[in-house]
Amino acid sequence: KQWYQRRVAITAGGLTRVRSSFKMPQQKPQSAQQLFYEPISGHAFNADLTQIVVSNSTPHTHVMKRGADGKYTEGHVLEQHLERVTSVDWAPTSNRIVTCAGDRNAYVWNFEQESGTWIPCLVLLRINRAATTVRWSPAEDRFAVGSGARLLSVCYFDPENNW
C-alpha cells in the first residue's frame, strides 16, 4: 500500500496543481481500559512495556502489570506520600521509579527481587512549594524535580547520604 498518493490536475490556464492525500493503513481498533475513576496525574512505562506506574491524584501510586489479554491488573501499591502524587518516572535500565508529590518530597523506589516489593528511599527536596514534575536523566544517576515555586532541583546519588 502506498501511504502517500499524488494527483495532478490541469487547470484552465494550463498550470498544474499537485494535490496530496494521506491514506491511513488499516489497523485493528485499539481497546481502551478504564484504570480508575479519578483523573490520572502521571504515568510511565518500564523498559519492555509490560508494566506501567500510574498516579491517580491520590497519595498512592499503582504499579500495574499487563496480562496475556492486554489488560492491566494492579501488582503493587506504593504508599509513602502524604499528599497527592503529581508526577512519576521509571528509569528503563536501572528499573527505579521516582515519584514526587504535593508534600514537597520525592521518593526513589528500588525493586527487591528476593521479597518482590518496592523499597522507598526518601529524598528531601528543600523546596517551599509542591513538587509538580519529575524526570530521570538519560544516565539515570540523577533526576530533576520541578516545583510550584518555579524552581528546579537536581538530585543525585551520594553513597554516604543516599539521595
Image (cartoon, rainbow, N blue to C red):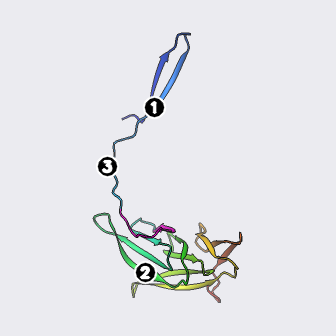
The residue drawn where x is 34% and y is 46% is 27
Q: Position of residue 120 (x, y in %)?
A: 52, 85
Disc number placed over residue 104 in the picture, else none: none
Kindly identify the amino acid type of the residue bearing the numbered disc 3: Lys
The residue drawn where x is 49% and y is 25% is 19
> Disc 1 on helix, strand or loop?
strand
Near-viewer residue (55 or 142): 55
> Magenta stretch containing residue 44, yes or no?
yes
Q: Mark 1 packing: few (<14 Cα in 10 Å), some, or many (20+)?
A: few
Q: Quadrant of residue 84?
A: bottom right
CA–CA distance between discs 2 and 3?
32 Å
Task: Identify residue for label 1.
Answer: 21
> Disc 3 on helix, strand or loop?
loop
CA–CA distance between discs 1 and 3?
22 Å
- The stretch in magenta equals 33-45
Task: Identify residue for label 3.
Answer: 28
Q: Quadrant of the C terminus?
A: bottom right
Disc number placed over residue 77 in the picture, else none: 2
Kindly identify the amino acid type of the residue bearing the numbered disc 2: Val
The residue drawn where x is 46% and y is 81% is 78
Q: Earlier in the sequence, mark 1 or mark 3?
A: 1
Callouts 2 and 1 close, C-beta under 8 Å: no
Callouts 1 and 3 close, C-beta under 8 Å: no
Q: Position of residue 94 (x, y in %)?
A: 51, 74
